[in-house]
Structure formats: structure tokens, C-alpha cells
Image (tube, rainbow, N blue to C red):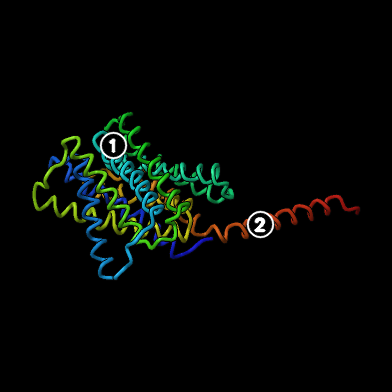
Amino acid sequence: MFSMKGFLAALVTSSTFGLLPLFTLPVMGDGMNVLAILFYRFLFSAGLLMLLLLGLRCDLRITRAEGWTLAGLSLFYDGSAAFLFWAYHYLPGGVAATINFLYPVIVTVIMIGWFHEKKSFWTFCALALAFGGVAALSLSKGSNGQGISLLGVGLDLISALSYALYIVWVNHSCVRKMPMLKLNFYVFLFAAAGMGVLSVATGQLQAVPDGKSYANLTLMALICTVVSNITLVYAIQHLGSTLTSVLGAMESVTAVLVGVWVFGEAFTPVLALGILLIILSVTVVVLSPHLTPIFRFFKYYYLTEMRGKHRTLRAPR
């Protein structure tokens, strides 16, 4: 069932996720590696949520089954973030964000093929429009003279698969009704622990180089992690996995606009077409509860009119 609150939450999620290159690329430019960036990102995020949960006096106890589930979710979240950051080494930020949007297709396939979710004509229409918009955005980026690395595309697709599995699992697990702040706190905590162990084991744990990097990491943790994931879980709970992933198209729009306004990338007609298609996909999702009755009305009216004309033509004089 469509929920306006879930819809708004999904838009906030995709828009804040789309800001990720704004904070990530400068930190990577300062020499920090992917594992260290992710360790600090998740550590700072868990710390911010811990302060909020303590202030709200929330019960932080979890069962053993919930603990294992949260640990598993953190692995998929770690994988999604790590492979996307590695893709940044081989792809422009806007291209990486747009290719990463293929995860709604994966979510839809999983939900229909594995969980037997009811097929919706309008969902497929929204997916087609969003996929076309993403393709146009990627084409626009490629036209700027930057080659598309197959390795970068492969890393990005693995990231998309990990994120799709994360979205589906959240909505079909024993933690699906867990309070949003509590769920995200444990996911970030386990994710930080995993990245910390991996960073130490591979000798890639680094200190934050300067105050600017601290600010970028803190904003990344607050905006692109805490806010985006709280609204993500809320959207999944009130809108479902499929529609939430479709509305994730706005992530591509945000990433492209950041590239244009911050990194000076050209705003081309192809890029404008991509944004238009994505906005249309979001519009279809919003209007989908009303589109089916309207479509049925016009279909009935058209058939009735055609039958009436047919009888008139055959009527004797």
C-alpha cells in the first residue's frame, strides 16, 4: 500500500545517499584508503546514534537471533559501501552513482521471483523509466571524454547486488519491526567492527590526516549514513522494498547535480533527459494507486464507445 510518509522518507534516503561523493572524493583525495574511510564512517555513525539512543533512554538489549541477523546485515552493508568506494577509483562519481542504481532491478527480481510479490504494471513502468534515466545519465558522463572501466562497472554491480540483498533482508527478517534507531546503531556498530578488523589485518588502518577530513567524515556519517539509513528503514517498513528501491532513482539525480555544481561537470541535453525520465518514474510511483482505476475507466469507456460505433455501423437503415 502507498504511504506518503514512506514516499517522503524514500526521497530523503536517495537524496542523502546521492551526496556521498561530495564527502567521499575529497577524503580519498587526501590519501585515505577505502577501508579506513569506511571504518571511520561507520564508527562515527554508531557513536552519533549511541548518543541519541542514550538521550532517549532506549532499551539496547537484543536476542541472539537478532544479533546474528544484524551481523549478517552489516556484512552486506559493508560490501555495498566498500565495492562502491573501490568503484570510485575507476569511475567518475556521477557514473558510479548512476550504475549503482541498478539495484532496484535486482530487488524487483528477488521480490517477484523468490518472495512471489504481486506483479505491478506501474512498478515495471517506473522501473523502465528509471532505468532509461540512469542509462541517459551514464551516457552523458561518458560523453565528457572519460572512459568507462569494465573493472569499475563490475565493482559497482557487486555493490548494487549487496545493497539489494540488504534491503530485501531488512524487510524479511526478525529485526524488521525493531526500532529504526536501534537497528541502524547495531548495523553500523557491526559494520565498523568488521571494517576495523579488516583494516588492521591488511595494514590499511590510517589516522585521519586533518581537520577538513574529520569534517567530511563526520558529515558523511551524519547525512549519508545516519539520516539516510533511518529514513531507508522507515521507507521499507511503510512502502515496501520494491517501491523504496524504485524511488532510489533520486540518488542518481542528486549525484549528477553535485557533479555539475561542485565538480564543474557539463549539464548536457542527455543529462537533462535522464533527470526528466527519473522524475517521471517517481511520479508514476506516487500516482500508481490512482493510475489503475483511471486506466480501467478509459479502457472501459473506449471499449464501450467502440462497441457502440460497431453496432451503429451494422444497424439496418
User: Mark 2: few, some, or many residues within 10 Å (few <14, many ≥20)?
Assistant: few
Image coordinates for residue 311, horizontal then vertical, percent: 83, 53
Q: Amino acid at mark 2?
A: Arg
In the picture, measured across the screen, residue 179 lies left or right of residue 22, that is right
Identify which residue, 308 or 132, lies in the foreground.
Answer: 132
Taking the spot 46% from the left edge, 64% from the top edge, the residue there is 4
For the C terminus, the quadrant is bottom right
For the N terminus, the quadrant is bottom right
Identify which residue, 147 or 41, lies in the foreground.
Answer: 41
Taking the spot 29% from the left edge, 70% from the top edge, the residue there is 57
Image coordinates for residue 229, horizontal then vertical, percent: 34, 56
- Indicate whether 235 appears above or below 192: below
Query: Residue 289 occupies which quadrant of the picture?
Result: bottom right
Q: Element at badge 1?
A: helix
The residue furthest left is 210
Q: Which mark is residue 312?
A: none
Query: Residue 97 occupies which quadrant of the picture?
Result: top left
Q: Element at badge 2?
A: helix
Q: CA distance from mark 2 to mark 1?
A: 45 Å
The residue furthest top is 150
Identify which residue, 1 or 184, lies in the foreground.
Answer: 184
Taking the spot 28% from the left edge, 54% from the top edge, the residue there is 224
Residue wearing tag 2? 296
